[in-house]
Every structure is written in structure tokens, then in C-alpha cells.
Amino acid sequence: MPAAIVHSADPSSTSILVEVEGMKCAGCVAAVERRLQQTAGVEAVSVNLITRLAKVDYDAALIEDPTVLTTEITGLGFRAQLRQDDNPLTLPIAEIPPLQQQRLQLAIAAFLLIVSSWGHLGHWLDHPLPGTDQLWFHALLATWALLGPGRSILQAGWQGLRCGAPNMNSLVLLGTGSAYLASLVALLWPQLGWVCFFDEPVMLLGFILLGRTLEEQARFRSQAALQNLLALQPETTQLLTAPSSIAPQDLLEAPAQIWPVAQLRAGDYVQVLPGDRIPVDGCIVAGQSTLDTAMLTGEPLPQPCQVGDRVCAGTLNLSHRLVIRAEQTGSQTRLAAIVRCVAEAQQRKAPVQRFADAIAGRFVYGVCAIAALTFGFWATLGSRWWPQVLQQPLPGLLIHAPHHGMEMAHPHSHSPLLLALTLAISVLVVACPCALGLATPTAILVATGLAAEQGILVRGGDVLEQLARIKHFVFDKTGTLTQGQFELIEIQPLADVDPDRLLQWAAALEADSRHPLATALQTAAQAANLAPIAASDRQQVPGLGVSGTCDGRSLRLGNPTWVQVATAKLPTGSAAATSIWLADDQQLLACFWLQDQPRPEAAEVVQALRSRGATVQILSGDRQTTAVALAQQLGLESETVVAEVLPEDKAAAIAALQSQGDAVAMIGDGINDAPALATAAVGISLAAGSDIAQDSAGLLLSRDRLDSVLVAWNLSQMGLRTIRQNLTWALGYNVVMLPLAAGAFLPAYGLALTPAIAGACMAVSSLAVVSNSLLLRYWFRRSLNHSVSV
């Protein structure tokens, strides 16, 4: 099966996804990105810790075989393979494959921890189990913990050290390895007077495995929205084997065979039974039923459907059998596009995440340096300056004087070397680059998933972060603030031509156009039962109009300036109506007056934005009087309207606003909005808009409702707030815990951390970040009824 390779507009530039297993912290992410960026031919790299994916843009002329990328990653000690399928509906959720094995390792580590603790509890209770109070027994437990449940962690840590890319596992290796080796020295050479703490590796690995298992489960839950989308795609369907030989009225009862959905092709006929999900985008050729389309469209009520209606993959057939002719299958369906958009959004990094990665990328080196300084300080100067700390019991260390096989000469004192080693191990273990690495991607993962549930498709975490800072919203008028369903209310002939013929010419020029004005003219011609005529040499100029030839006559249809009849006296109409002008080479022929109505939710959305301190403007190519009339209906002042603007001028207007220091969001739907959408800090397109507008936008409102703008803005602010909380916690945790573990509070307060407690704190820190991101789901859903009133 070929790798999932996507070619860009540049024929030599290619993007590919690489699955990377074994990454545990931001240090791992930084190591993978550094190694790939150093590879000749690689142009850009983005690695996601949560999804375990690396997106690599490279020059295909320099890298002919992309497997060299996996070789580079494997050299760092991670498992890597090219993603083998570009259909997002067949991709598994990013859950570590050996999660079940990790749970088994956790169970073994917990058993060892219980046995180790029982040996000490039994001693204090005067009922020790035979042999459990022996040091060699605890040495055996520690060895089992290191070579059993902790083996994969230590191997990954060693590989990172060996490759010059230390990570979280490397810190665990250094911490547990130091504790184990020091205990072995104490066991084999008791005359040194060292304390054995074989229990520390057992406890440390137990806490770490517990934290990682809970963390992985939380990560998996954070992808609930993507799981829900993937669940909409059935695995099998009923395929009609010879539909061409079956009469249309017999299709519903025709024999069918179970067929994998992944093998369906355009033109196939499938039967969909009540209670089954539709597997393809297609057209109903037999039957009528009702469909549940809530997951894709947000429409809560069942929607009736009949022959000729188009349906989307993932919608649920509720009542009767249907036969559907497939038009788009697999990766070409609307459902696949939504899943792909969500997955790509989770892969793109927000600027704040790049900041966190920059810190975490060198974090492990800093921790190792602090641990080395801690060891050196307490082994030399610290114990001389504060000799009393040597008389205090080592925090959390169990004195094994009563145990058989060793008698401590000074049970209430210990050497500077032992104290220094203990504190250095605690420093290595308590440090948590994982929390830094997880702070942003987990929040982005949850936020983009929640957005998808609300019908909001976000291009990436960077778009969410930018949207959260927006305070200036600019709306297109036609089809955005209005319903885009124009009605022709008057034809005003300005030459001696039959009005029906004028309408035929206008409809012919606008044939195949999706613009709301064009649709209104075509609908009016059909309603009048006018025969369609052909137009040749048609040429569309976005934002201005269309030209062509009808009945041998060269015609222009659009705004008066563009049709070049500026010297003609233009008639006036209703202030709320929109005009479109028809002219030939000699004269103005007609004016078509059309009227549109505001969207029902438009006024509430505009006022809700303003009530939250945002500036709202209207930017339209329509005439000034029409745009101002709409603004007044929405409760906006006439000063907020900029009308009669060409497409390129829309982009210039957005650029001018942003040059004043405002980050601007542009909301539009037409081809003429595309330059402005691309220029704005955040472009937002409605689902009913043109393909060009959708491609230019950072957000796509698939439910085609303006109140989704409010939902997206609210969610982005909550997501950014969660990211800041996570980063504050992650940075604050390390700022506080590293000095505590290094013994900064030991002389004055007698406070320090044991390696085991340090490991528990580290696990809790990562889990806290992931859990806080998961809470975003709760707070967002709770806020929907309070902050969104439209």
C-alpha cells in the first residue's frame, strides 16, 4: 500500500506523515524535529506529541525515498513508519498500541510496590513475612522492577542518551539507575555506612507507570470528537451487484451482497437499510425516508429525503430502505473532508506551542546540569555550611538497621555523598518536561474536536490562538449577513427590448454561477417559463460582473461602472434593494432590482459581538444605500459600512485595518471575498460559500449559521485560557519543585523530596495538565447556554 503522500502546488515539494511511537515529552518532540530538519532536502517539520505524527515537507528531487526519514527517527530510538493510507476515515485514533501491555506492566509494578512496602510494614508490626525484611530480597525486587516493567522506559532513556537526545526517559534512567547502583554499593560494601534504598526504584517506576497509564487514557479521551466522527463511517454496506439490469422500481428489493465500504467506487449502487449509516456521498435513485443529519449539519430534526436528493456519508437512515448511487467515496466524501480538516488542525502548532517547545527542547539538559550541581554542592560545600542536615533522617529513606545482613553503624547520621546522591536523584526524577510538552497540544486537540462537534472546521491551532485575540470583525453582506436568497422584484427596461428577452440574456450570462444574484436571475427565468438560451465567450470578473455574447450581441452584466455606461442617467430604486445592470456596446439596456433578507440570527450575532467589546463592520461590493439599509436593520451605524468595494480593494481595506494594529477577522462566502479572507488574520467562510472562499479561510462554518462565529470565538478564548493555565502550571511546577528537590529548603525547614515522592509528583504534574485540558469540554458545554444566546 502506498504511503500517504500529498503533493503541493510546487511539483518538487511533497508532504508526508510519519507515525512516531515512543515519544514521551517535549524533549522527544524537539529531538525528532531537530534530526529531521538536519536532513538534506527537508523543508519543514511539525511533530505532534499527542497524535504521534510528524508532518514533513521535503524536496522530492533531493529525497527520492521517504523511508530515509523513518531511518533518521529510528536512529534516535523511536519507532517510526510512514502512514500508509491517505483516507482519514481509515486512520486509527492515536492511541499507543501497547497500552494494554502498559497496563500489564503497571500491574506488575504495583505488585512489586505492595510486596516491597509489606516488608517494611510487617517489620513495624512485628509480623514480617519470611525473607521480606532481608536486603537481598529488596535488591531482587528492585532488579525485577528495572528489568521487568521499567525495561522499556530505561531502554528508551539509554537510546536518547546514546544518540545525544536525552528525554524524560533519560531522566528516569539516570535517577533509578543511580539509586540502584548506590544501593548495590551499600549492600556489597557495608563498611561504607551507606543507606540502601532499593525501594526507591520500585516506588519510582510504580508511580511513573501509574501516571503514564492514566495520562494515556486521558489523551485518548481528549480525541473523543474525532472518534465520534470516525464512528459515522460504516465498515460494510449492501452493494447491488448488477444495477443496470434491474428496473428502477425493483431496486429496493434487488439482491445485494455485503461489501467493504473502503472498496466502493463512484457509480456503485448501495442499499441502505433503516438504522444504517449512509456510506457514500451520492444521489437517491430509489426510495424515500428520513435522515438524521445532526452530526454533520447540526439540524436536530429528521430530514425527509426522496429520489433525486443528494445525501452525505455518515448520515443515519431512520425509516425506510434507500438505494443510493455513489458519487464520492472514501477520502472524497464530505465526512472525510471534515475528519481530514480536524486531523490537520491538530497537527498544526499554535505560536504559543512553539514557545513551549523551545523551552522544553533544552529542558532535559538543564535538569541534568542542575542535578550535577546539586550533587557537587551537597557533597562538598553544603554539608560543611550546614552540618546539621547530616544528622537529620534522610527524607523518606528507610534505615535497614534491624534487617538481617546489615547493621548501620550510625543510624541517625549519614555521609555527605549519600545526601548529595539522594537529592540529585530527586532532581532528575521530579523534573517534568512532559507537562510542558502536553500543555498546548492537549488543549488544541480538545478545542478542535469541540469545534468539529459544533460544525466549525478549524485549519489549525494557530488559527484558534489568533481568533482568541480578535477584537475586530468585518462581515461581507450578500450571503453572509443576508440569507443570500435574492428575489427579483422588478425588471426596469431602459431600451426598446422585450423584458422577457432581457431576463433570458441575464440568465444565460449567469449560467453555472453560484453567486446569489445569479441564482435569483436563473430562478426568475425558470419561474417565467422562459426557454434557456446559450451565451458564448462568457468571462466572469469577480466583484464586477460577467460578459458574453447572446443572439450575436456583446453584453455586460454587473455594476454600472463596470458596464461602462457612467454617462447614462441611472434610475433609482428601493434603498434596501440591490441592482444589477445590463448593457451592450452602445447603451444601458436594463436594471434588475433584487432584494435579500438578513439572516434571522444576524442582528443578535452582531450585537453579541459588540456587547463583548468587539468592533463590527460591513464590507460590501453592493451600493452604499443598500449596505447602509442592512446595517440599520442590524443595529449598526452607517459609519460602520464600507460599500461599493472591489475584491482587491476589500483586501486592501483589511490590510489597512491591520496596519493600525488591529487583528481582523473577515467573514465571507463569495469568490470576491477570497482575497480579503486570505489577507485577514483569521478568515471565516460559510459552508454555502464558494470553494475559493473556503480554501482561503482559516475557519469553515459547515452548518452555515452566523452564530457559529460566536461559538468559535468563545471556544478559542476558552482554549487559549486553558493553554495559559497549563503552561503556568507546567512552568510553575518546575520552578517550585526543582529547588525543593535540590535541597534549597533543607537547611532552614528540613524539607526535601525522596526520589519516590519526586516521581509521584512528576506523574501528577503531567496528569494535571491533561485533565485540565479535558475539563475544557465541560466548561465549554456549560458556557453554550450562557454565552451564546442566538
Image (cartoon, helix red, strand yellow):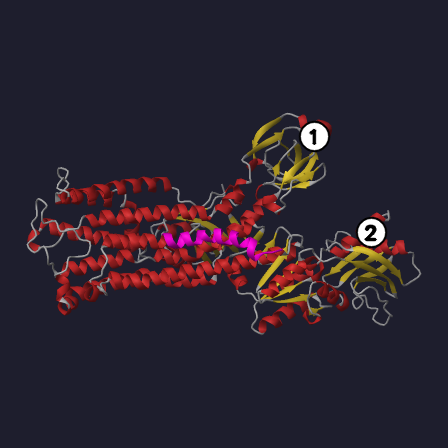
188 vs 725, nearest the viewer: 725
10 Å crowding of disc 1: few (<14), some (14-19), many (20+): few
Majority secondary structure of magenta residues: helix
Q: Which residues are magenta?
A: 767-790
SS at circle 1: helix
Amino acid type for the residue under numbered disc 2: Ala
* Horizontal and vertical percent position of residue 702: 61, 51
Q: How many marks?
A: 2
Apparent side of residue 357 relative to residue 681 in the rendered image (left or right): left
Left or right relative to 474: residue 171: left
Residue that badge 1 annotates: 244
- At label 1, the amino acid type is Ser
Comparing 82 with 487, the one in front is 487
Outermost residue to the bottom: 660
Residue 162 visible in image: no
* Magenta highlight on residue 508: no
- Of callouts 2 and 1, which one flags the residue occurring earlier in the amino acid sequence? 1
In the rendered image, which residue does mark 2 sit on? 524
Which residue is pictured at 85% across the width and 53% down the height? 504
Other residues around mark 2 within 10 Å, as few (<14) / some (14–19) / many (≥20):
some
Quarter of the C terminus within the rendering: bottom right
Find residue 558 and report its horizontal and vertical position in percent: 79, 62
The residue sitting at 55% across, 36% down in the picture is: 234
Name the side, left or right, on which 22 lies relative to 143.
right
Element assignment for label 2 = helix
Residue 282: image quadrant is: top right
Q: In the picture shown, does residue 738 fall above or below 109?
A: below
**Residue 556 quadrant:** bottom right
The dot on residue 313 is none
